[in-house]
Image (spheres, helix red, strand yellow):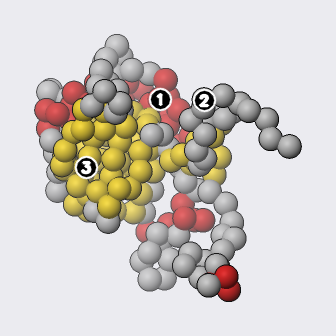
Amino acid sequence: MRKDLGVKPAVYPMPVLMIATYDENGVVDVMNAAWGMICDMDKITLSLTETHKTVKNIKLNKAFTVSLADVKNVKEADFFGIASGNTMADKFERSGLTATKSERVNAPIIEEFPITMECELAEIIDTDNVYSIIGKIVNVSAHEEVLDEKDRIDIEKAGVLMFDQFRAGYYVTGEKVGQAWNSGKELM
């Protein structure tokens, strides 16, 4: 039997995305954002609040990076979600992580996170119902230890975090249970 739960953001899993930018002084800022997704083969959309320092930085530099947080860095990833760059000037410094400048966009790559998308600002959508940043992915880089023998990202090796909005928990990607575009063929 079903039970009504009311209005909730009932999508699981949500990615744990680390959005990294530079501010007007070249200081690294990183925020944790779960409300983002791929929206085309070379685009990502981030549904953010316009008041975030990260959004101001994206508008300024027209660039950002998006990294997938991993289990090795769960403490730092969560910190980037609870501390605000608007009120904590040394937020990134406190994390103890390492940033290097992307060679493709004016944004930092956080070295400890295993998978990073380097993005140019493509569009901002601002309506009564949504504020979204659309980024054009110009490159993806990954730690070699999370790649398979064909240099494809092996999500089981990456230990990528997922966010559970129902109980506010972080989980790790798990075992493969089916093959996309194949598991349902017998029903065709």
Going by the numbered disc 2, the residue's amino acid type is: Val
* Left or right: residue 129 compared with residue 26: right
Q: Residues within 10 Å of mark 1 (few under 14, many from 20)?
A: some
Tell me what residue is drawn at x 21 percent, y 39 percent: 124
Residue 135 badge: 3
Q: CA distance from mark 2 to mark 3?
A: 29 Å
Going by the numbered disc 3, the residue's amino acid type is: Gly
Q: Residue furthest right?
A: 1
Which secondary structure lies at badge 1? helix
Q: In terms of sequence position, does the residue under pointer 2 or pointer 3 come before the other?
A: 2
The residue labelled by disc 2 is: 7
Residue 141 badge: none
Give how far across and how far down residue 52 sits, in percent: 32, 24
Q: Residues within 10 Å of mark 3 (few under 14, many from 20)?
A: many
Which secondary structure lies at badge 2? loop
Give how far across and how far down residue 106 sits, in percent: 16, 45
Query: Which quadrant holds the N terminus?
Result: top right
The residue labelled by disc 1 is: 81
The residue closer to the viewer here, 138 or 184, is 184
**Badges 3 and 1: C-beta atoms under 8 Å apart?**
no
Mark in front: 2 vs 3: 2
Is residue 27 visible to the viewer in this orientation of the structure?
no
Mark in front: 3 vs 1: 3
Instruction: Determine which quarter of the picture holds residue 186.
Output: bottom right
Tell me what residue is drawn at x 59 percent, y 48 percent: 13
